[in-house]
Amino acid sequence: MPSVVDQQRLEQITEDLVQLYEVHGPPVPIESMLQRPPHEMWEELDINNLSGSFISIGDRYAPRMSLARLFARQIASSEWGSKQALSSLVHDEEAIHAFARMLVMPASLIRSLSEGARTPEYISAHFEVPADDALLRLQELGLLKQDR
């Protein structure tokens, strides 16, 4: 997990990307965001050319998280990411995983849900992410109900 300062900065960068990509609700369109970067942030990426070996398939939504991690790495290693001081993330797997969770489950979209909908099961289905990642994201945001 990134430090609190880094986490706050990554959360803000995620919100900037949500606005830039005009994401209005879940599920976040990670695949098209990765393929069609706005304002020439990086070269278009044809995900059809990717090897299937990097994709985790343990859960029906695991491939989306694999794409989210690829997206996080792409952002961090791009010139735009360098300008945002994200280059160090590329070699920090834990930070990449945390950033990927932010990208696929932005804080603003999670917080817009009713309190009753802030469960790993609901978020998993609504955001199309594995329940384990939804649980981690709720914990990161301090939104996990204590009666679980």
Image: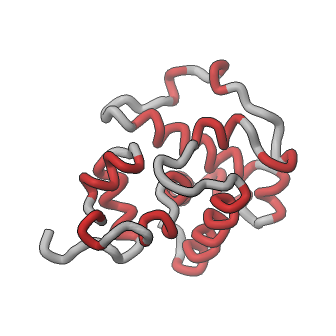
- Residue at (82%, 43%) from the top-left corner? 42
In the rendered image, the quadrant that contains the C terminus is bottom left
- Residue at (73%, 31%) from the top-left corner? 45
- State how the image is colored: secondary structure
What is the tally of numbered marks visible in this picture? 0
Task: Give the percent coordinates (x, y) of residue 103.
Answer: 55, 55
In the rendered image, the residue lying farthest to the bottom is 5
Task: Give the percent coordinates (x, y) of residue 147.
Answer: 13, 74
Rendered view: 141 above or below 92:
below
- Residue at (30%, 65%) from the top-left corner? 118
Task: Give the percent coordinates (x, y) of residue 109.
Answer: 48, 64
Rendered view: 71 above or below 49:
below
Rendered view: 77 above or below 113:
above
Task: Give the percent coordinates (x, y) of residue 1.
Answer: 47, 66
Q: Who is closer to the viewer here, 70 or 117? A: 117
In the rendered image, the residue lying farthest to the left is 147
| Residue 37 lies in quadrant | top right
